[in-house]
Amino acid sequence: MSTTITNSTAERKHSHVDICLREDVAFSTLTTGFEQYRLRHNALPELKYADLSTETDFLGKRISLPLMISSMTGGYSEAADLNRKLAEAAERFQLPLGVGSMRQALEESSHRDSFAVVRRHAPTTQIFANIGAPEIAKGLSDSNLQTMIELIRADGLIIHLNAAQELFQPEGGTDFRRVLDAVAAITAKLPVPVLVKEVGCGISGPVARQLLKTGVQVIDVAGAGGISWQKVEETRYKSMFGIDTRFSTQGLEELLNWGIPTTECLVEVAALRENSAGTRPFSIIASGGIQSGLDIAKSIALGADLAASAGALLKALHADTLEETLTAWTNDLRATMFLTGSATIAELQKNRPISKQ
Ligand SMILES: Cc1cc2nc3c(=O)[nH]c(=O)nc-3n(C[C@H](O)[C@H](O)[C@H](O)COP(=O)(O)O)c2cc1C
């Protein structure tokens, strides 16, 4: 089935979902790196499987599983249905959930309900607002910040850094000056935590260090190995213009696979925490290509506090198997906890039962 491509902001948001569901937009020459790691078997777990707990704390709240449903959508009429279903799953499983970029909610009040629906269906879980680097660099008014937080009674604001996506997007915003200053200004004035994520090209250790100095409380590495947003936007570009002559053939192939693998980002950012005497505590989310509870377990054993997933959960939602998928991932994680002798998520993180293959 071919994907219909149009270019108003609302239609763009719609086509993002369509493309992620119907086209092959996965990285083809890069992987997450999770396959290079092996959790270490413990022949003497000294645990009862039934007693294991996958619960953990995230930003002061107890959640059932170290997993966030990553920011995806909102801002067009059909998004309300997707967001309602994601919210219902988040509430049932007590998982944090990020909404998609709220730019549309700020630009057109008619789109606000496609975000507000999330809080109605997830009254007790953590819900995070979301906005992109290009918008904050242009300057977001205090009233815009307030609207995003109040619309969904957000537990925090996620700022996404998406330079490669904007570069490939036919109508992308490519002025990424003053983003760090804007993050610092928002962090200083918001009453809720600020989280920063990429969208699949990854946040390196040095970039995370710069962000943490501004008071950001959570780094979601969103590394390469899952969806390539360059490929998503390239699909839109080609459907509008036929052929992409912006780059050389060889250059294009490499740029479509541009990014830092998820595990590489995670190892670098986790090392910052180990060497961070005197800096404020922060949380780490591992995302970009999470496909199973084994990936979640490896993330925790490599130092993350949570994992997060978008593409795989969107596909499960589309196939009407979101609940089964979350249950299977929970069971995967419980199996690895049992077999590594980790009774809790904190033990899995502290004992690091993982090695490179
Ligand atoms: C349909 C769709 C829409 C997305 N929209 C947003 C967005 O608005 N804001 C954002 O921060 N990330 C957005 N993302 C990116 C994801 O949150 C995630 O960082 C990225 O897809 C990599 O994770 P994955 O490999 O698990 O999909 C979107 C992802 C999908 C699948």
Image (cartoon, rainbow, N blue to C red):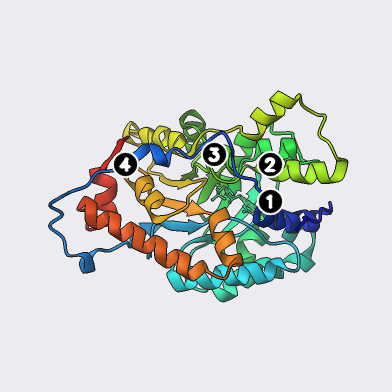
Residue 264 drawn at (x, y percent): 44, 33
- Which residue matches tag 2? 231
Label 1 CB, ligand 1: below 8 Å?
Answer: no
Q: Is residue 299 above or below residue 265?
A: below
Amino acid type at circle 1 is Glu
Q: Are dots 1 and 2 in contact, CB under 8 Å?
A: yes
| Residue 346 percent across, percent down from the top left | 27, 52
Q: Residue at x 12, y 52 (%)?
A: 44
Of helix, strand and loop, which one carries label 3? loop
Judging by the rendered image, the residue that carries numbered circle 1 is 23
Earlier in the chain: of badge 4 and badge 2, it is 4
Q: Amino acid at mark 4?
A: Arg
The circle drawn on residue 224 is 3
Q: Earlier in the sequence, mark 3 or mark 1?
A: 1
Residue 47 sits in quarter:
bottom left
Label disc, if present, on residue 38 of the rendered structure: 4
Looking at the image, tell me whether mark 1 or mark 2 is earlier in sequence order. Answer: 1
Q: CA distance from mark 2 to mark 3?
A: 12 Å
- Looking at the image, residue 52 lies above or below residue 248: below
Give above or below for 61 relative to 183. below
